[in-house]
Image (cartoon, rainbow, N blue to C red):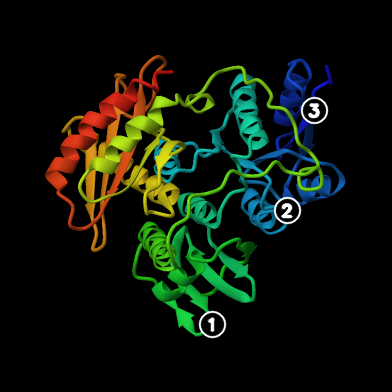
Amino acid sequence: MPERAEQTVLLVDDEEFFLRSMVDGFAAHRGGVSVLTASNGREALRVLGEAHVDLVVTDLKMPEMDGFELVAELSRTRPELPVMIMTAFGTSELEAGLRARGITRYLDKPIDFQTLSAKVFEQLNGAASGHLRGISLATLLQMIELDRKTCTVNVSADERWGALVFRAGELLDASTGARHGDDAALEIFAWDQCAIDLGPAAAQRTKVVTLSLTALLMEAFRRRDERARTAGPRREPRPAAAPTPKEEPHRHAPIPAPATTHEEAVPMNVQDKLKDFSHVDGFSAAAVYTPTGEVLAVLAGDVANIHDVGVLANAVLLNAQKASLEMGAGRGQQVHVEGERAHLLARCVNEGTDPLRSQPGKAHIHVVLVLKPDASIGLAKMRLNSISEKLAEDFRG
């Protein structure tokens, strides 16, 4: 039986003791993982130029070149490389903000070895299965907002270029060509396969953008979906061909993770249950997510970007739950977002006692249903409740 190839993780942090302890931990842990280290983003890029790396785990606050700049550079030069974020600023507000925005590949410092290794094994398994990619423009911008960072984000795609000006995490302005403000931001957010570069803060003080970053991202996703629908009939995706050695020179067998997760095995009957949504009047799409925004199952229908829509609907639901708890109204179970061209229903099914966290052996899922504007909302909500309860049966971990 051939020996399984080892996978490599690059840990980037300016705390030398933390790096040494993590390296020692993985050396004593039989799991087929080797660890490289770097003390800042610049050193990390040098290591990446000299060695093959399967996953980057980086802190945000570092000297010389911080984690934001490193992520931006990797989005341009290594967009396929999975990245996980560590943050030592783990306030409850920041954690809730990260989870609400679907930013799930992060770790709150201080981190013990067991927590880090479990997450690393989980991410490496996902990368080996082709489910993970580098951090997207939308995710990076939301992290900048949460960290209240001041900078200029330069974005390019093909022959197009644009700039996004942030001050203390607030989007002040966007520009591309002759466009400025909201219109420019919406255009930039619609670009695919962007190259990103973080520059120094602009001297601008006046706020030109009128909408929030989340509102702009949601509108950009909606417009992208509308263009996809009007471009022609939607084709069912064909099964991907097996990659050739040239296309995937570092293919590895999945590494067994120490702890199981919801994503490891989705029962076959989940898709059958999701198909029940197709009988709902005005159905467009449906999906099931973890509370942190990781997709569990999808019935795309005629919504091309259901993954993006689901993450943002997840954010709305989590914010509504937090608000209802703070008001003393109990756990928020469902939200309804009414738009000009669609309705979004998001429902939480939580069998545990903690309103915002999953618990072992208890199902905790978020179900998102997208409906056409003329749908019968009352009947759809009843159907959503019924099907969500059935789906929960398959996700008790």
Give the alpha-carbon distance from disc 3 to disc 2, as whole Å. 31 Å
Q: Nearer the viewer, residue 187 or 141?
A: 187
Q: Quadrant of the N terminus?
A: top right
Residue at the disc numbered 1 = 177
Picture quadrant where residue 171 is located: bottom left
Q: Quadrant of the C terminus?
A: top left
Q: Position of residue 75 (x, y in %)?
A: 65, 55
Residue at the disc numbered 2 = 64
Q: Residue at x 76, y 22 (%)?
A: 32
Q: Position of residue 300 (x, y in %)?
A: 40, 47
Q: Are marks 1 and 3 in contact (CB under 8 Å)?
A: no
Residue at the disc numbered 3 = 6
Give the alpha-carbon distance from disc 1 to disc 2, as whole Å. 32 Å
Q: Position of residue 155 (x, y in %)?
A: 59, 67
**Is 172 on the left-hand or right-hand side of 51?**
left
- Mark closer to the observer (1, 3): 3
